[in-house]
Amino acid sequence: MLLSVALAGILALFVHSLAPRIASDILKEPRTLELLQLMSYSLIPAAIHACFNGYYYGQKNSIPPAICQITEQLVRVFGTLFIYQVLQEEGRPLEPIHAVWGLVIGELAGLLVNITAYLLTDKGAIFHNSSANKGTLSSIITQPLKNLSIMAIPLTLNHVLMTLSHSLENLLLPQQLMAFGYTSDEALGHFGILTGMALSVIFFPSAITNSLSVLLLPRISETKSKGDICAVLDTIKGALCCGVALGSLCTFLFLLSADWFGTYIFDNALAGFYIRTLSILCPFMYTSSLLSSIVNGLGYASLTLACNLSGCAVRILAIWFLVPAYGMYAYIISMIVAAVVVTGELIWVVNAKCKQ
């Protein structure tokens, strides 16, 4: 908690103070200044309730994190709707800053629910544990951090580098679409349709596999530490069957319903085309998320990082070299190729390590 809050505080100050330069020099969009500054307020609450979620996942108790996340999403959505209704009554338009207010309010609500659930269910064990009063402050802090760092550093590095890679993709894609011949508004429009409409539909079922991934890591790690190899293999087989089955089903459903999403949900035919084209991602994307958690649970987080970065490299190279010549089609094809490459690499890693 101390480490997470300290890092989140530093990042919040960094983002808030450097928001003008980030908006103008990196994002190339001055209108994001207020959005960045407001978003920075959500980092500390997010860091705190992430610690509580990790605590419960480690205990194989997913109910408090589930309640927290549902509450966070409901408050975020209905908070934004409430702001929208107030603006409608005042005759003012809804702007991006109001959606960010919903995000910040949702983070605060999630934190409040998580702390309340912890105090009610665990009687504040962290704060009243008698063992916390033994030894010096340095020994209380440094030993747990040393134990955590063995797994936390590669996992954190994985998340940080993946986030940076995705951010680089999001920064480069509109600019390279402009090099293809789109105007600034057209480039942002195509980018928004792809990421805000099509990918939001494609990623929606991944909520199931992401939940399984979170629970898989402690399960695999525990059974491996006990030397129960049969249980490890059974868990891996069950998870992979689930990922492939869900992904194949979603591909079939999205192929059939893509036009419906484009026409009736988004009122945008291009969104339907993107959904149909990207539906082939589902089996690879859902399976790779489970495989990543399995590899992390086996204790090879650095290999997960290498596999995921190879996929990012495929997409970034395609954006840089192919999008200016072939437009959005090149990026879509690169997403499919990257998903196949990452899934194949992770399967090879799991197979090799399980043989050992």
Image (cartoon, rainbow, N blue to C red):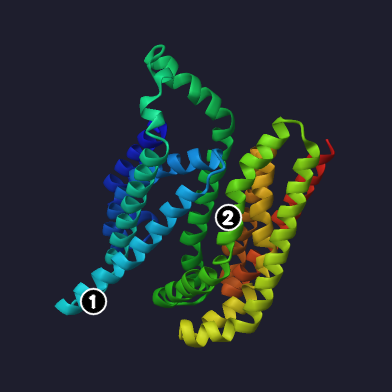
- Counting residues from the N terminus, which is met first, the one under dot 1 or under dot 2? 1
Amino acid on which disc 1 is placed? Pro
Quarter where residue 274 is shown: bottom right
Vertically, is 206 above or below 68? below
Q: Residue furthest right?
A: 355
Which residue is at a point 79% across and 37% down the rendered structure image?
229
Tag nearer the camera, 1 or 2: 2
Q: Is residue 299 visible?
A: no
**Residues marked 1 and 2 touching at CB (< 8 Å):** no
Q: Quadrant of the C terminus?
A: top right
Q: In this figure, which residue is indicated by the disc labeled 2?
A: 210
For disc 1, the neighbor class at 10 Å (few under 14, some 14 to 19, many from 20) is few
Disc on res. 167: none
Q: In the image, is 219 to the left or to the right of 52?
A: right
Residue 102 drawn at (x, y percent): 31, 62
Disc on res. 93: 1
Q: In the image, is 343 to the left or to the right of 189?
A: right
Which residue is at a point 28% across and 47% down the rendered structure image?
16
Vertically, is 351 above or below 244? above
Residue 285 drawn at (x, y percent): 65, 61
